[in-house]
Amino acid sequence: MAIGDGEPVLQFKSVCVVGGGMAGLAVARELRREGHTVTVMEQSGDVGGQWLYDRRTDVEDPMGAVAPVRVPSSIYACLRLISPREVMGCSDFQFLPREGAGRDPRRYPGHRELHCYLRDFCHVFGIMETVRLNTRVLRVAPAAMSMSTTTRRWAVRSVRRLGGTEDDDGALEDEEVFDAVVVATGNYAQPMLPNDIQGMDEWRRRQLHSHSYRTPEPFHGEAVVVVGCGASGKDIALDLGRVAREAHLAASSEAEATTPAMSRMLANHGDVLRLHPRVRQLRADGQVEFADGSSVVADTVIYCTGYAYSFPFLDTGGAVTVSDGGYVVGPLFEHVFTPSLAPSLSFVGVPRKVLIPWFFEVQARWVAQVLSGRHALPSEEQMLRSVEEQLRAREAAGVPRKHTHNIASVEPRDMYEFGGKYCDFTPTEEWKKELILSSNASMDDDVETFRNRADGDSENVRKGRQGWLGGLVAQAQEETAVKTEF
């Protein structure tokens, strides 16, 4: 619909954003920028999502087998970023080093620094006024339509913990109706447990998912088996090596076991650290048997086996589902819109292996502009056809279904071109793309030292970084201006 000069007549909606983490905050800012009315519902006592460190764990369910998990955060105390801060900021609010108590100016800071950045982001753009903390979403479902309208709206039932206590007896339950809902709960919502290890139910010693790991001290003097050699598996094994009697890493594939980084870890910590093939069976007497027939006696098994998508609050009558063992959400057009419910229901933060928060920001702007009518979606049939064609193309290329939402590791060009394709978003600078590649290469070479290396940047990256650091003063001035704007 257009007027006079051909510009669209914009529509401003009431939108509920489920989740106040990195993705949800990006969504809130873009929705407000487009003129929508925003309500963010966040179950924790502060914004940040996964980046809000919580030293508590669920002692009754350390495996995270029950959905939803009772303690949302999966951050462990020693966690440091694996991407440099230069590439981890929003397009117009860079993750620049800041002075002050508790701040971490390192290129690869600890998790607390990223949470501070997200708090700064909220402060500058006035997002906190849209956020309801200690508010857990219980159900999202289509609202009953009246006789006078055919426009789909959404009923959102939530419960707010009064005073931030865990006692739901003193909680306030409410149901509201919104024009649209954006699900931004991320992809670290529900621990994923292996289904190919025999005897997990018979094991009488300690088992937990990395979701419930915080510090190594509870494992002092123990023999611990860490299942999985991804980023968290290597981090936790190295952390345990400081206090454990033995730390046994079980690789799920030969590719995990044969990297230069793994070779260096074993060479540096061979007195404590051991590498094995995948775990085949757990025995009631404490024996852990590996695929090659070898075994060890362990006190604890920690599963660093990733996370499944989970939206227990979402009731769409089967229009959107989680399948393939928790790896696939669908159907989703470009990982964002459910064709039969678009544009009033969307997802931001589903893709894995992407540049964050930049990619979330791109998705959020697209959603905001589609809801306002600035951009239009293809028809439902066209979107479904696109989803099916993409799945077939990936299958033909030999990409496993579990990598359906992995973008950068499969189609890196698609990640960088997404913004220009759908919402005229400013492209990522070439020096940042180069820095990402060199950082990943350094991590693959030596996971223990890559964060602290002072050399290795190309001339192109050095020049780009100088300009980036030069933005400190300019960003401070812009922050002052933006505060008045919002």
Image: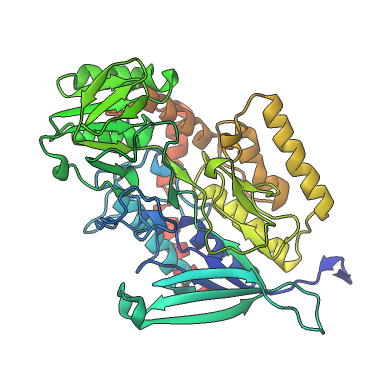
Q: Residue at x 68, y 62 (%)?
A: 317
Question: Hey, which residue is sitting farthest left in the picture?
Answer: 221
Q: Say which quarter of the image contains residue 344.
A: bottom right
Of the pair 268 and 467, the residue shown nearer to us: 268
Q: How far from the left and from the top, in percent, is residue 421?
A: 72, 46
Foreground residue, 129 or 201? 201
Residue 334, how many percent across, how many down? 68, 46
Q: Is residue 351 above or below residue 102?
A: above
Q: Is residue 453 left or right of residue 403?
A: left
Return the x and y of residue 260 as percentages of the image width and height: 35, 17
Q: In percent of the image, x 51 and y 42: which residue is there?
A: 355
Q: Position of residue 94 (x, y in %)?
A: 45, 52
Q: State left or right for residue 444 relative to residue 339.
A: left
2 versus 101 height, above or below: below
In the rendered view, tell whether residue 215 sits above or below residue 283.
Answer: below
| Picture quarter with the N terminus | bottom right
Can you name the residue that lies furthest to the right here? Answer: 4
Q: How many marks?
A: 0
Residue 422 in view (yes/no): yes
Q: How is the image coloured?
A: rainbow
In the picture, measured across the screen, residue 480 lies left or right of residue 76, that is right
Q: Is residue 451 visible?
A: no
- Given residues 376 and 85, the one toward you in this image is 376
